[in-house]
Amino acid sequence: MILIVALFAAVLALDPLKWTNNASPIRSVDTIDAMVRSVQWDRVGIYLVSIENGSSVLIKDKRPHLIGARTKIERVTRDNGSIFYRFPE
């Protein structure tokens, strides 16, 4: 029993924000112009994307995207205030 509780505590300590963010409803989705700058591929692509305001973000996606291509991404805001970026479906 102690082992199970310790294992659960370890998993929760590793990524508590992921669970709370996934439980929070989406408040808004804004479309933004961007450009794909680079990619690292390991089962899932991790893309470095430059946003129109000059900043860069990392986005995970299973679909391929061309480096140097102009694209649209979505800025998603949840009710708890967290913000993440994704490629549109």
Image (spheres, rainbow, N blue to C red):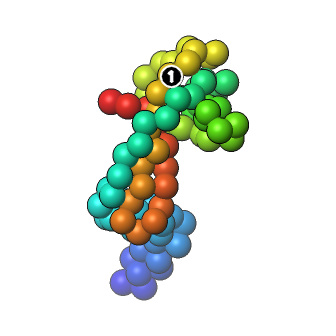
Amino acid type assigned to the residue bearing label 1 in the image: Thr
- In the rendered image of this protein, does residue 30 appear above or below residue 50? below
In the picture of the structure, the residue carrying the numbered disc 1 is 71
Residue at image location 65% in from the left, 38% down from the top: 53
| x and y percentages locating residue 6 in the rendered image | 47, 79
Say which quadrant the N terminus sits in: bottom left
- In the rendered image of this protein, does residue 26 appear above or below residue 31? below
Q: Nearer the viewer, residue 12 or 30?
A: 30
Q: Is residue 59 left or right of residue 21?
A: right
Q: Is residue 61 visible?
A: no
| x and y percentages locating residue 43 in the rendered image | 50, 29
Residue at image location 60% in from the left, 24% down from the top: 35
| x and y percentages locating residue 48 in the rendered image | 64, 32
Which residue is outermost to the bottom? 2
Residue at image location 41% in from the left, 81% down from the top: 5
* Residue 62 location, quadrant: top left
SS class, disc 1: strand
Q: Nearer the viewer, residue 33 or 82?
A: 33
Which residue is outermost to the right? 54
Q: Is residue 20 visible?
A: yes
* Residue 27 location, quadrant: bottom left
Q: Is residue 58 left or right of residue 81?
A: right
Q: Is residue 70 left or right of residue 48?
A: left
| x and y percentages locating residue 2 in the rendered image | 42, 85
Mark 1 surroundings: few (<14), some (14-19) or many (≥20) residues within 10 A? some
